[in-house]
Amino acid sequence: MQTVNLPINNNEFNLQQCYQCGKCTAGCPVAFAMDIAPNKIIRMLQFGLLEETFRTETIWLCASCATCSTRCPKGVDLAKLMDSLRQKAIERGIRPTGRGRRVSIFNSLFLSDLEKYGRTHEMGLMMKYNLNTLDPLKNAFMGFFLFTKGKLNIGPHRIKGAKDIKRIMENVKRLEAEKK
């Protein structure tokens, strides 16, 4: 069995340590939605099937909650591995499909809101998400109900440190661009 070296942020994942106990998969809150179980992603990598892992929905559906990494008796950081696989797939021009595409859309819209306002604007976020996923009326009834109860604001609220958050995010983007 070989060690797969993913040259991302100088991280190396010694996948030989994984003996397929399945604790990562058993603890994963989104394993039910994945096409390949998290421990099977490691198994694929142990067999050198890196390109095939990029084509799974699993790497895109991972919530990066790190439950898997915490539960691993051998210390394999599967959450970090999933993040690295996503980054590597994007670098190679591979984009998610299916449910993974929806997660990717939500993630980019969420980060965009965070950069603009310093927090999320729930109504705007869901409207943009529903438009981008071609389901514009999906939450219309619930949104109307929440709005009439005063639970949903039409406009975004800015926080005091919004400029600081924007600066931090710009620095992260700059640093990521420098690494390439």
Image (tube, helix red, strand yellow):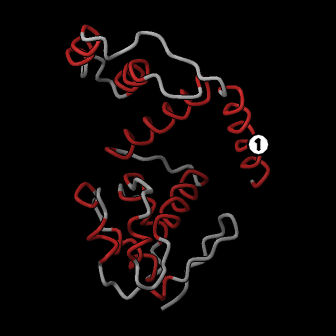
Q: Relative to residue 76, is residue 134 depicted above or below?
A: above
Q: How many marks?
A: 1
Question: Closer to the camera, 4 or 14?
Answer: 14
Question: Closer to the camera, 119 or 113?
Answer: 119
Q: Relative to residue 16, is residue 79 depicted above or below?
A: above
Q: Kindly identify the residue that appears in the image at 56 percent across and 49 percent down.
A: 93
Q: Quadrant of residue 52?
A: bottom left
Amino acid on which the number 1 mark rests in the picture:
Arg
Q: Is residue 65 left or right of residue 83?
A: left
Q: Quadrant of residue 8?
A: bottom right
Q: Quadrant of residue 7?
A: bottom right
Q: Kindly identify the residue that appears in the image at 37 percent across and 88 percent down.
A: 19
Q: Is residue 27 left or right of residue 69?
A: left
Q: Relative to residue 65, is residue 114 depicted above or below?
A: above
Q: Residue 161 in the image: x percent, y percent?
A: 67, 28
Residue lying at the far right of the rendered structure: 178
Q: Residue 179 in the image: x percent, y percent?
A: 76, 55
Q: Relative to residue 16, is residue 69 depicted above or below?
A: above
Residue lying at the far bottom of the rendered structure: 1
Q: Secondary structure at mark 1?
A: helix
Q: Kindly identify the residue that appears in the image at 32 percent across and 44 percent down.
A: 98
Q: Residue 35 in the image: x percent, y percent?
A: 27, 60
Q: Residue 144 in the image: x percent, y percent?
A: 25, 11
Q: Is residue 142 left or right of residue 7?
A: left
- Label 1 CA crowd tier, 10 Å (few <14, some 14–19, many 20+): few
Q: Is residue 76 left or right of residue 144?
A: right
Q: Kindly identify the residue that appears in the image at 49 percent across and 82 percent down.
A: 15
Return the residue at label 1.
174
Question: Closer to the camera, 74 or 55?
Answer: 74
